[in-house]
Amino acid sequence: MIFLKLGGSLITDKTQNETVRQQVLDRLARELARAVVNHGQPILVGHGSGSFGHMAAKSYGTRDGVHTPEGWRGFAHVSVAAARLNRRVSDALHEAGVPIVSLPPSASVQCSDGRITSMETRPIHLALQSGLCPLVMGDVAWDSVRGGTIVSTEEVFAFLAGEFPVTRVLLAGETEGVWHGADRTLVERITSDNWTGLLADVGGSRGADVTGGMAGKVRDMLSLVRAHPRVEVRIFSGLIAGNLERVLAGEPLGTEVSFGDS
């Protein structure tokens, strides 16, 4: 099966509070709907929080922990902001014909010091068995050490890779892949072997991002492929019309993140 993320920087303007790129979101929804019909492979969809959850989370410091009444009010604020975007994504996918069902991680994820330790996956299994596309997202979560925290879509994917027979993880964002250096060279392949040398020149995120921007995405995906070496991870641009369909059909666009050089 495929895990597909619609990045927050792709479907929102992360420099403007709670601003959806509606035309981009609608087009991606149509591309995904055609792919679901044409290829029939089970797909779990996730989306980032973009200018909804990230801006709220940054103002309250939610990722680092929640321990005060003000912090818990912020936790609730972030939850509501993330849910607002989730509703917009769900509506766009539904209207395009994708059989989507939203399953927010805040209802089932448990963390310990920022790491997911458990997640209720039965509803996802049942959705897939019913021919539906489960929708997850970057969200707030309960944490035994921090009280509360934020989990990214990539972290949710990394946990679920141990629960489902995923073969491909596709991250659709703003950029064509991972850029490196002052001349912005596209990196075709990242492994644990070359990542240390690339890290210093890989950028963060345009606008607010409490989960580490591009470097954080690559770090999480390297952890995923270390645990599941047969999984193919690809980071690519969803701003280019048709790219989502092409990648879902197997075209090697963007940057691949893989276990090793073999």
Image (spheres, rainbow, N blue to C red):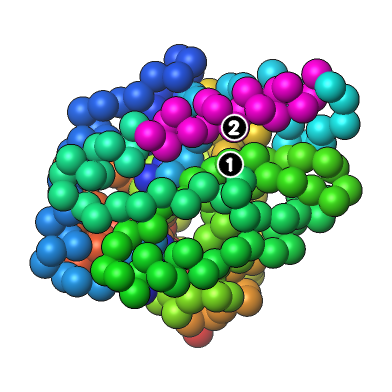
Residue visible at 85% across and 42% down in the picture: 146
Residue 262 at what x, y percent from top left? Answer: 50, 84
Circles 2 and 1, Cβ within 8 Å, touching? The answer is yes
Question: Is 46 on the left-hand or right-hand side of 115?
Answer: left
Q: Counting other residues with Cα less than 10 Å from the Cα at mark 1, is it few (<14), some (14-19), or many (20 or more)?
A: many
Image location of residue 190, percent across then percent down: 52, 63
Secondary structure beneath dot 1 equals strand
Circle number at residue 79: 2
The residue beneath circle 1 is: 139
* SS for callout 2: helix
Which SS type dominates the magenta stretch? helix
Residue 117 locus on image (x, y percent): 73, 63
User: What residue is rendered at 58% in x and 75% in y?
Assistant: 162
Q: Amino acid at mark 1?
A: Asp
Asked whether residue 182 appears in the rendered view, the answer is no
Q: Which quadrant would the N terminus be assigned to in this image?
A: bottom left
Residue 26 makes an appearance in the image? yes
Query: Is residue 139 depicted above or below 1 in this figure?
Result: above
Q: Which residues are magenta?
A: 70-87
